[in-house]
Amino acid sequence: MGKTFLRGTFQNSESREMDTDVLVIGGGPAGAWAALNAASKGARVILVDKGYCGTSGATAPSGTGVWYVNPDPEDREAAMKSREALGGYLADRKWMTSVLNKTYENIHQLEAWQYPFPLDEEGKPHRNSLQGPEYMRLMRKQVKKAGVKIWDHSPALELLADEYGVGGASGVFTTTGERWTVKAGAVVMATGGCSFLSKALGCNVLTGDGYLLAAEAGANFSGMEFSNAYAIAPAFASVTKTAFYTWATFYYEDGSIIEGAGSQKGRSVIAKTLQTQPVYARLDKADDEMQKWMRKAQPNFFLPFDRAGINPFTQRFPVTLRLEGTVRGTGGIHLVNENCATNVPGLYAAGDAATREFICGGFTGGGSHNAAWAMSSGSWAGEAAAVYALKLGVNSSKRNVVGVSTTPIVSAFNRGAQKRTVSHEITKAVQAEVNPYDINLFRTENKLLPSLRRLDQIWKEIRGGILIDEADVVKARESAAMTATARWMYSSALERKETRGMHKRLDYQKQDPNQHYRILTGGLDKIWVKPESLPQNREVIQG
Amino acid sequence: MIELISESRCTSCGLCVMVCPTGVFDQEKGNIPVIARKNDCQTCYMCEAYCPVDAMYVSPFAEEDVKVKEEELIQSGILGSYRKEIGWGKGRTSGAAFDTSYKMFRLMSKMPGH
């Protein structure tokens, strides 16, 4: 376990303490499936969410395709093959097969719970898309029905651990300022990825909190170089729905077409153009029928247009790229087996908090893989955490676990202050390192290295105590988590001296067969990076 | 960002305070909630989706304040429009049942780069 420095005691005397078998941190799809599966094994489960289980995270306000493929061998083969090259051949067929199976099973479970999958003209249901509000409202209902205790507005601030591993967490109820402590046999980290408060739809709760919590307990990460996903959005709005721009043409201000710009491979062209001038889009490739389908498929996509009085099919509107970081990127907490166990005993990870390289490699699989991964990894993590915790039995509550935070958790919680706080300054400074395309998207050692040094300096100041007087301990933790996340990202990005998946190095533009491995990282004050030792039986696929 | 809680419509049920993932609202017992931390609003529209009386308006402008007039929002049919669109509320059928994504996906798979 990491050494603790500067750890104060929470001044607020009010606190709630509880024992449970499994504590799930995060109430998006991965956390909800984890809680359900843990409960189905007979475990007592508490689910804490920083916001509200049902609306929190990237899925709830949006809509997503699902990697739901019929168990026909040819269909499955095609599904697995389709994105292997894009991902730089870092995915794993065994994991993909398991995820396809589990997703198939879970989608049918959703249907049994009466998720209203649409029927076509012949009355045949189509199960490869989920609308976020409906899906997550249903998940909350099922989680409650399973007897899971849901604590909303209850961010975790630190994990509890002893020499045998993780055994709970503590945090704060943000509505009352009261502190909570939960001793648990096992913890599932389902806190999502990190998109650095970029206002990508639903992503502002995703600040890498779970990464920091896990790292403080000694967890490793994988694929953190695959963390530079950017999504297309109207320049003024939050709604990121890149897939719809498949039907867009992109324009300069004068109305001439930007050659090569596109939603898929042409995103770099958009970024390059945005560095010097505005970019406009118009969904002029969508015919009347498609326009109707788009509206029924993703009502949220049209909110900004309808409300700003823009017809996106006939009028050009300015677009931007919003950083989705590891939410769409594939990096995250490393998993050591299909139980979604981490290298720390008692700690499991699922969804975007965990690495998604096993099924996507180094390139985002789009929403559909992400949704499949969340529900599959969540299910496995929940089940395994329950088995682990139930094996410990009553012994777990007798453990003498202590907090392992590396940042000060002092003072009474006060969420009044917003601007001119140290947390805000840190957040701005970190965003200035991770948002720019010329550092994070078009990567070179010349830009990455000085950026990493600046981030290291911020971390040093955090460890020196600059957050000690912050009244809003949740925002303080978020700023520390984003700083740490950016350091793992850029340390890994510097290590991978090639171009693979979404990781583009301008100074190493080719994919290098000698670097055909995943990259692990970890550590806090001192960050380490190393290639993952390759399993002997890995299938070698020619790029 | 969130711009309006209609005082004439709001029933002080507190649901928006509960469902907001970023804790934008405060509410004193029995009173109409207030927009206490507007800068934390992530423009996710979830409060609108959950408000049972269509009292909330989230402006599409994620980073700038916009002055809105309740009457205009009612007249234009925007107040409550998202909720209607996703088929939430009494007597409505969930929009998920009419999700045409599968039709889009079918065409998309035939387009270059997919």
Image (tube, coloured by chain):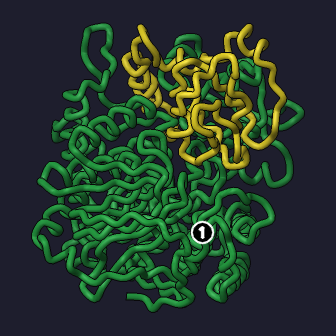
Residue A115 image-quadrant placement: top left
Reply above or below: A228 against A536. Answer: above
Amino acid, disc 1: Ala
Which residue position is annotated with label 1?
A412
Crowd band around label 1 with a 10 angstrom C-alpha radius: few (<14), some (14–19), many (20+): some
* Location of residue A98 in the rendering, given as x and y in whole percent from the top left corner: 20, 53
Indicate the position of residue A365 as horizontal and vertical percent values. Answer: 43, 49
Identify which residue, A507 or B72, lies in the foreground.
Answer: B72
Name the residue rendered at 39%, 37% in the picture: A136
Residue A353 is drawn in which quadrant?
A: bottom left
Query: Image height check: is A244 above or below A207?
Result: above
Occupied quadrant, residue A43: bottom left
The colour chain A appears in is green
Specify the colour of chain B: yellow
A211 vs A228, nearest the viewer: A211
**Whether residue A147 is visible:** yes
Q: Chain of mark 1?
A: A
Q: Residue at x 28, y 84 (%)?
A: A400
Say above or below: A520 vs A132: below
> On the rendered structure, is A278 left or right of A162?
right
Expressed as whole percent of the image width and height from the top left, the position of residue B103 reads 41, 21
